[in-house]
Amino acid sequence: MARLSVNVDHVATLREARRISEPDPVTAAAIVELAGADGIIVHLREDRRHIKDRDLRLLKQTVKSKLNLEMASTEEMIRIALEVKPDMATLVPEKREELTTEGGLDVNMNREIIKNSVALLKDGEIVVSLFVDPDIDQITAAHRVGADYVEIHTGTFCDAKDRIEEEKELDRILTAVKMAGELKLGINAGHGLNYLNIKRLTGINEIEEFSIGHSIISRALFVGLDQAVREMIALINN
């Protein structure tokens, strides 16, 4: 049965819209855990547009399940990760102008940089995941640079315009999952998942954990954060 980790970045985004102290993503994380989620995810960006260093450090002190830090493969972020010691670090591509992460890491094109980052994080006893597209070459490259996990980017599947395109993208995910399993990589999945499209992926037994943020925080506006998390867990469990 797959686990659920919830990204609370969008709580911080709402806070930063007014540049005040609420809503607090640290408080949100506590509610998410009490609702039954298995982990908390935050992305500390170079420009600190939503999650701040303060948030990350308080979450390290308060999260009882698993804290997953999404981060770019830069010297600054590696230093912060080694200081804070999240349970997992997920290396992601990052562009200043993007609204959200637009795709997976190109591990092949950045092999030496990523390999060095993975080694430093693992030396710091941090489990390392790479956010990659459902592509065999990228899965293989993730294994070669020493990653413990891959998080398969599901955004293209979620954005499919019709059933034919959706089936094509689902096949890509299934192929990537099979390859990751053969290479003994842990397998997570995320990006763009919501209360409808998640149903097509819950039958993939090899996926250990789903990383979901925007759709849960959006639903929380109408039903409350506790209920929004419980509803997603119920869908994953089914």
Image: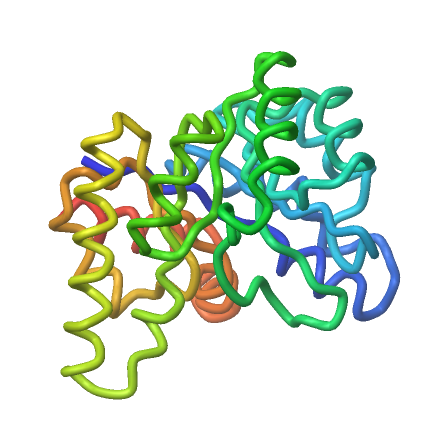
- Tell me if residue 187 comes above or below residue 120 in the rendering: below
**Residue situated in front as seen by the camera: 9 or 25:** 9
Q: Tell me if 9 is positioned left or right of 58 in this view.
A: left
Q: Position of residue 127 (x, y in %)?
A: 50, 23
**Residue situated in front as seen by the camera: 172 or 199:** 172
Q: Position of residue 132 (x, y in %)?
A: 43, 51
Q: Position of residue 184 (x, y in %)?
A: 26, 25
Q: Which residue shows up at 22% across the image and 49% down it?
A: 236
**Residue situated in front as seen by the camera: 192 or 181:** 181
Q: Which residue shows up at 25% across the image and 60% down it?
A: 198
Q: Quadrant of residue 186?
A: top left
- Tell me if residue 204 comes above or below residue 115 in the rendering: below
Q: Tell me if 220 is positioned left or right of 158 in this view.
A: right
Q: Tell me if 16 is positioned left or right of 103 in this view.
A: right
- Tally the numbered discs: 0
Residue farthest to the right?
19
Q: Which residue shows up at 72% across the image and 35% down it?
A: 56
Q: Which residue shows up at 46% across the image and 34% down it?
A: 39
Residue farthest to the bottom?
161
For the N terminus, give its image quadrant. top left
Q: Quadrant of residue 208?
A: top left
Q: Position of residue 3 (x, y in %)?
A: 31, 37
Visual colour scheme: rainbow
